[in-house]
């Protein structure tokens, strides 16, 4: 009887252990979310907008505790299948927004705090403005994918930095023109001392909006970020340490923990690549752009 009881107790413990993933859940988690909006701007200009959010999520309820939102936008005028000028890009809507953006973020925060990812998605209706819907989707994505442990009191910050390139349409070769952007975005959580407790990183490579020789805009194909591509990004084979982009991004983010914005900015690089031994074991890819966006995210969190 005692042996049977012992076996039953052991079984219960094992079930409990594996159902919890073998570890205790954190107090809170940091998530990084995004959403892309392709629009037709003034005078028919094609525009790409990438919205990104940082969200601190309750470890027990999965509800949003705090958020930060930013966006990168790029557009170009087209005429006769050609780009007029070099196009325009705006690295940070938050930096440009002023009081209006602050009011929008405050209202959005009041809407989503206390809600889970599914509850936030349920807020989107046919009447929801496109930009608001994009931000809600980005927040829901952050809440659903949050996995970097942090504290409930930590402040989230997010930032994006992008670059724009353009190609004219060539009717003779039956190719489309395009405006194309590379966008890096990062989220961090900061403690009361201004030190990073958690970080997340992602990037779009060649996110494009196409147009033909008659200036008609082509419906954009779905695009995945480098993190979403996972092993399909195919960086592992060219890596000296045998790690894929998302794995090296995780190594980079882990290296940020415990650092202030100034300390992140001081991470050693040469030719854009890391030089510090403690980082090189997990990340050898070019990081200059990632450092810049992480610093901006930390500064955004500190400003809250």
Image: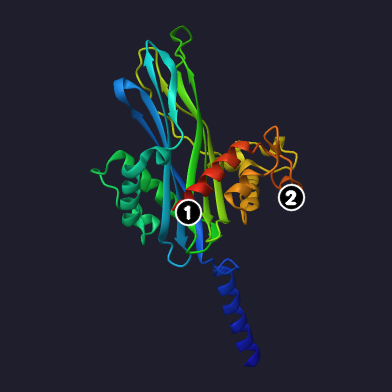
- Residue 228 lies left or right of residue 178; in this view the side is right
Residue located at (64% from left, 39% from top):
287
Query: Which residue reaches farthest left?
Result: 127
Q: What secondary structure is marked by label 1?
A: strand
Residue located at (42% from left, 15% from top):
83
Crowding around mark 2 (Cα neighbors within 10 Å: few <14, some 14 to 19, many 20+) is few
Residue 161 pos. (x, y %): 51, 36
Residue 137 pos. (x, y %): 38, 46
Quadrant housing the N terminus: bottom right
* Quadrant of residue 119 within the rendered picture: bottom left
Residue located at (27% from left, 41% from top):
129
Residue 115 pos. (x, y %): 36, 60
The residue that mark 1 highlights is 156
Query: Which residue reaches farthest bottom?
Result: 1
* 192 shown above or below 159: below
The residue that mark 2 highlights is 278
């Amino acid at each position: 009887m005692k042996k049977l009881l012992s076996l039953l107790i052991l079984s219960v413990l094992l079930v409990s252990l594996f159902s919890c993933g073998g570890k205790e859940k954190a107090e809170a988690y940091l998530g990084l979310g995004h959403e892309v909006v392709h629009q037709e701007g003034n005078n028919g200009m094609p525009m790409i907008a990438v919205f990104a959010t940082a969200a601190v999520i309750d470890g027990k309820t999965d509800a949003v505790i705090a958020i930060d939102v930013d966006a990168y936008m790029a557009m170009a005028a087209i005429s006769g299948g050609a780009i007029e000028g070099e196009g325009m890009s705006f690295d940070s809507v938050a930096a440009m927004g002023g009081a209006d953006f602050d009011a929008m973020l405050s209202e959005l925060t009041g809407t989503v705090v206390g809600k889970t990812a599914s509850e936030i998605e349920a807020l989107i209706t046919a009447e929801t403005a496109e930009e608001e819907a994009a931000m809600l989707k980005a927040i829901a994505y952050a809440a659903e994918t949050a996995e970097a442990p942090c504290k409930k009191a930590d402040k989230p910050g997010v930032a994006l930095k992008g670059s724009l390139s353009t190609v004219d349409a060539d009717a003779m070769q039956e190719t489309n023109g395009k405006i194309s952007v590379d966008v890096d975005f990062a989220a961090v959580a900061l403690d009361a001392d201004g030190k990073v407790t958690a970080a997340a990183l992602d990037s779009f490579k060649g996110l494009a909006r196409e147009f033909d020789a008659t200036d008609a805009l082509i419906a954009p194909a779905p695009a995945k970020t480098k993190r979403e591509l996972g092993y399909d990004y195919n960086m592992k084979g060219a890596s000296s340490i045998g790690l894929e982009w998302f794995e090296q991004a995780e190594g980079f983010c882990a290296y940020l923990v415990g650092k202030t914005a100034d300390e992140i900015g001081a991470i050693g690089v040469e030719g854009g690549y890391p030089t510090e031994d403690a980082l090189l074991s997990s990340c050898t890819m070019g990081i200059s752009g990632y450092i810049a966006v992480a610093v901006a995210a930390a500064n955004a969190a500190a400003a809250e």
